[in-house]
Image (spheres, rainbow, N blue to C red):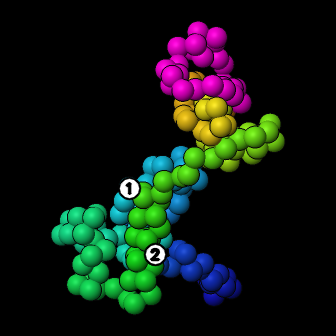
């Protein structure tokens, strides 16, 4: 028995994985497999700020999602994590209060750019109808159909069934 040498054991096998490590791996796997839409509020805040998920859950239970940031002084986290939370709050506030100005579309190039920007975040193909007034300002954008990853089948009945505003002069498909 003295002839055989003990092989070094890999670090990952020496220590039992912690619950935190296992949970992080599960969340990463879920993001990769199903996308970020599957994350709950606690997971999103934890990922963006680095605050442990259990702390975030406790704080959200105590303060609620809206008052979470307002009570940031009472939360036992680092200054950097507090700044990150404030940034998350700031961007979510900006997004929720964003009111786009009525853009005008004067050419097919502008229409193409508008649709590319609008449709780039969709995971599936969609068919939308854009309605313009006499001054070529956008009145309404309505999704008519959602398809699969590579197609959005549409029938003329679906286009004609859209509720067009009375002031709509031009329509782009």
- The answer to whether 114 appears left or right of 17 in the picture is right
| Residue 16, x across and y down, in percent | 43, 74
Under tag 1, what secondary structure? loop
| Residue 90, x across and y down, in percent | 43, 71
One can see residue 30 in this view: no
- The answer to whether 59 appears left or right of 114 in the picture is left
Determine if the magenta segment contains residue 19: no
Q: CA distance from mark 2 to mark 1?
A: 18 Å
The stretch of residues the image draws in magenta is 150-173
| Residue 172, x across and y down, in percent | 69, 28
Q: Residue at x 23, y 64 (%)?
A: 64
Residue nearest the viewer, comparing 10 with 157? 157
| Residue 39, x across and y down, in percent | 43, 54
Residue farthest toward the front in the current orientation of the protein = 134
Under tag 2, what secondary structure? helix
* 10 Å crowding of disc 2: few (<14), some (14-19), many (20+): some
- The answer to whether 59 appears left or right of 78 in the picture is left
Q: Residue at x 44, y 87 (%)?
A: 80
Write down the residue under mark 2: 87
- The answer to whether 150 appears left or right of 59 in the picture is right
Write down the residue under mark 1: 40
């Amino acid at each position: 028995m003295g002839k055989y040498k003990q092989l070094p054991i890999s670090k990952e096998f020496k220590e039992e994985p912690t619950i935190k490590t296992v949970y992080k791996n599960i969340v990463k796997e879920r993001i990769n497999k199903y996308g970020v839409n599957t994350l709950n509020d606690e997971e999103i805040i934890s990922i963006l700020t680095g605050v442990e998920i259990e702390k975030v859950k406790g704080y959200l239970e105590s303060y609620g999602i809206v008052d979470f940031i307002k009570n940031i002084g009472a939360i036992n986290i680092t200054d950097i994590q507090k700044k990150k939370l404030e940034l998350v709050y700031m961007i979510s506030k900006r997004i929720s209060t964003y009111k786009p100005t009525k853009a005008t579309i004067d050419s097919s190039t502008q229409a193409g750019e508008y649709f590319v920007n609008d449709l780039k975040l969709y995971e599936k193909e969609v068919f939308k109808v854009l309605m313009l007034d006499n001054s070529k300002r956008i009145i309404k954008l309505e999704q008519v159909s959602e398809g699969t990853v590579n197609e959005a089948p549409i029938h003329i009945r679906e286009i004609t069934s859209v509720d067009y505003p009375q002031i709509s002069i031009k329509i782009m498909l």
